[in-house]
Amino acid sequence: MSLAGEERKTSIMDLLNERGKVIASELSQLFEVSTETIRRDLDELEKENKLKKVYGGAVKFRVEVELGHNEREFVHAEAKRKIGFLAAELIEDNDVIVVDEGSTALQIIHFLVNKRNLTILTSSIPALMLLIEHQKRNKYDGKIIFIGGEVNAKHLRVSGPIAEKIMDDFYVNKSFVSVDGISLKNGVSSYDYERSVFTKKLIRCAETAIVVADSSKVDKRTVAKIVDMEDIHIIISDQAPPTEWKPALMKMDLRWIHPQ
């Protein structure tokens, strides 16, 4: 790009920081260049993670971070409850399953009262405590295996090399994993790299890999890639998939479950 182009990009960022949003047609008039040139500028700035393109212009780039467990538990709570119910319907007596540390996956435990002789592996401290409580009250019938590893106090989970090594010794029927982003192009992703590596392990040790994620995660890419969409067998969400996704999901034989 020419020096004039770099100066224009700097001016665009100054306007964006001042206003919070810029309109392509207005920038075209202001800088006396074509709207195609402005779109190329915005494309470049988006690749540099300096802004986010929207229809007709761009908005300030917002850095998202993973909320702590206690905060996540109350976000989209009703959607997560519905997902937990649908996920539990896939579990059969005698299954060996993984319930990971996500607040959505945690909801599955509330709907296991009629299941028999389960074995549940979990990396979630809240899930462990909930399973123990349910077992004491005869609301859970089965074994509980806590996956050891390095403890993350903020997210109340374990992960890392120790946890990954433990999972090398297990085969499971179904893994229920929470993710932070689901994208046809970029696969499923997490805010945290270490967590993404461990989640990949949980997916690959299972006969059936099931992603549980509310609709706020759909058509979204976060920091660390977990796996491609082709590596997932089922997605459970509170809403139907985007209409334009359906042919690709069918081609991948990826089942999408949602409330009817």
Image (tube, helix red, strand yellow):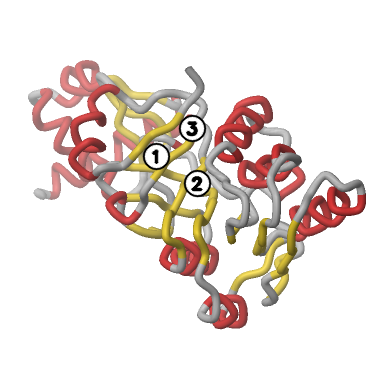
User: Disc 2 designates what residue?
Assistant: 180
Locate residue 15: give its quadrant: top left
Foreground pick, 65 / 198:
198
Q: Is residue 97 visible?
A: no
| Numbered mark located on residue 237 in the image | 3
Foreground pick, 174 / 241:
174
Q: Secondary structure at mark 2?
A: loop
**Upstream in the sequence, badge 1 or badge 3?**
1
Q: Is residue 229 visible?
A: yes
Q: Residue type at mark 1? A: Lys
Q: Residue type at mark 3? A: Ser
| Numbered mark located on residue 41 in the image | none
User: Disc 1 designates what residue?
Assistant: 220
- Position of residue 205 relative to residue 9, above or below, is below
Tell me whether circle 1 and circle 2 mark residues in contact (CB < 8 Å). yes
Foreground pick, 27 / 114:
114
- Residue 167 is situated, as x and y percent measured from the top left of the image, at 55, 75
Category of crowding for the residue at label 3, using alpha-carbon neighbours closer than 10 angstroms: few (below 14), some (14–19), many (at least 20): many
- Position of residue 241 relative to residue 202, above or below, is above
Category of crowding for the residue at label 2, using alpha-carbon neighbours closer than 10 angstroms: few (below 14), some (14–19), many (at least 20): many
- Residue 37 is situated, as x and y percent measured from the top left of the image, at 10, 32
- Residue 244 is situated, as x and y percent measured from the top left of the image, at 23, 26
- Residue 251 is situated, as x and y percent measured from the top left of the image, at 18, 40
Category of crowding for the residue at label 1, using alpha-carbon neighbours closer than 10 angstroms: few (below 14), some (14–19), many (at least 20): some
Label 1 to label 3: alpha-carbon separation = 14 Å
**Upstream in the sequence, badge 2 or badge 3?**
2
Label 1 to label 2: alpha-carbon separation = 8 Å
**How many discs mark residues in the rendered view?**
3
Q: Residue type at mark 2? A: Asp
- Tell me which residue sits at (62%, 33%) in the image: 85
- Tell me which residue sits at (47%, 46%) in the image: 211
Label 2 to label 3: alpha-carbon separation = 13 Å
